[in-house]
Image (tube, helix red, strand yellow):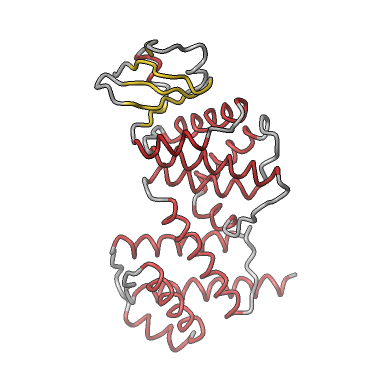
């Protein structure tokens, strides 16, 4: 394990140091910078509990981000990152660490100004990434004990995407693109079928998960078997759902820039028909 020599303490939780190869790094950890002086050594056993920023660009970004943040807020952010690290058993992505810190600080500033950006993908995020959403809920609940403002439920969805990015090593903008795609597909379905989906229903959960797995198959190039006879039957029996499934597929292709296999239309049609039928049954019983 590396040992580090302190160059400068930025605050109680962040300091600039030098590794054994004389490369400058930023060490982030609860109380790591308290009473540290130049050339003090950071013991190896302590390093295991820290986050180390080695990338020069991420170091500069992080220093700018925390320049005007109070100790209590930064402490809660460092604690929250530690929660993520413990729950997913890994946290090596420097960009995710910096991006999450930046997001929380921006959210606080926004709320202090009386502004709140609505999260349009909250329901989809909750369904698409339930484990990440659970972690994000824990983080937001924890941070709300210490922050000068109250982070609303919408922020749980945003934090969940950062957690997913850390877990999968996928860029946040890509994850946002897929969440937005699912949200757009849902809106098209509601508009075309003149229905409003219950975001808390199991039917909605099952359908959104199907869309997620469809997107994943497309991204991975996984081909599913095409039941030709069933495709012909569905086209004849359920033309509205069949045509809608193809509209959704074309949107996926345009967004993902990848081909979608014809067989996906069969499974989408079945899900659409079942979704619509269940809504009709519920409306009759209410």
**Left or right: 208, with 261 as reference point:** right
Query: Where is residue 133 drawn, in percent x and y?
Result: 54, 45
Query: Where is residue 265 drawn, in percent x and y?
Result: 40, 76
Name the residue nearer the viewer: 2 or 200.
2
Question: Is 91 above or below relative to 274?
Answer: above
Extreme residue toward the right, this view: 286
Report the number of numbered marks.
Answer: 0
Q: Name the residue rendered at 59%, 75% in the picture.
A: 277
**Left or right: 1, with 13 as reference point:** left
Q: Quadrant of residue 50?
A: top left
Quadrant of the image for the N terminus? top left
Q: Name the residue rendered at 43%, 36% in the picture.
A: 88
Q: Name the residue rendered at 34%, 82% in the picture.
A: 229
Extreme residue toward the bottom, this view: 236
**Left or right: 119, with 214 as reference point:** right
Query: Where is residue 268 drawn, in percent x and y?
Result: 44, 73
Q: Name the residue rendered at 55%, 41% in the picture.
A: 136
Name the residue nearer the viewer: 214 or 46.
46
Query: Where is residue 82 drawn, in percent x and y?
Result: 49, 29
Question: Is 98 above or below relative to 210?
Answer: above
Quadrant of the image for the C terminus? bottom right
Name the residue nearer the viewer: 142 or 38.
38
Question: Is 7 above or below relative to 116?
Answer: above
């Amino acid at each position: 394990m590396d040992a580090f020599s302190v160059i400068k303490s930025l605050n109680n939780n962040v300091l600039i140091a030098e590794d054994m190869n004389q490369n400058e790094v930023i060490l982030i950890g609860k109380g790591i910078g308290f009473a540290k002086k130049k050339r003090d050594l950071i013991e190896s056993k302590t390093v295991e509990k820290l986050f180390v920023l080695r990338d020069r660009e991420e170091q500069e970004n992080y220093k700018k981000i925390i320049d005007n943040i109070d100790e209590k807020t930064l402490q809660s952010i460092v604690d929250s990152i530690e929660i993520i690290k413990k729950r997913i058993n890994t946290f090596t992505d420097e960009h995710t660490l910096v991006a999450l810190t930046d997001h929380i600080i921006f959210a606080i500033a926004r709320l202090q100004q009386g502004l709140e950006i609505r999260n349009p993908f909250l329901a989809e995020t909750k369904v698409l990434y339930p484990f990440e959403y659970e972690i994000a809920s824990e983080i937001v609940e924890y941070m709300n004990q210490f922050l000068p403002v109250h982070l609303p439920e919408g922020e749980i969805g945003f934090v969940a995407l950062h957690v997913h990015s850390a877990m999968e090593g996928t860029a946040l903008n890509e994850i946002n693109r897929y969440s937005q795609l699912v949200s757009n597909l849902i809106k098209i379905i509601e508009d075309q079928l003149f229905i409003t989906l219950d975001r808390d229903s199991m039917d909605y959960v099952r359908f959104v998960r199907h869309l997620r797995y469809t997107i994943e198959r497309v991204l991975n190039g996984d081909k599913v078997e095409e039941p030709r006879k069933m495709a012909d039957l569905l086209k004849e029996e359920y033309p509205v759902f069949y045509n809608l499934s193809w509209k959704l597929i074309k949107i996926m292709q345009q967004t993902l820039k990848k081909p979608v296999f014809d067989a996906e239309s069969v499974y989408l049609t079945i899900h659409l028909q079942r979704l619509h039928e269940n809504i009709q049954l519920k409306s009759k019983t209410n």
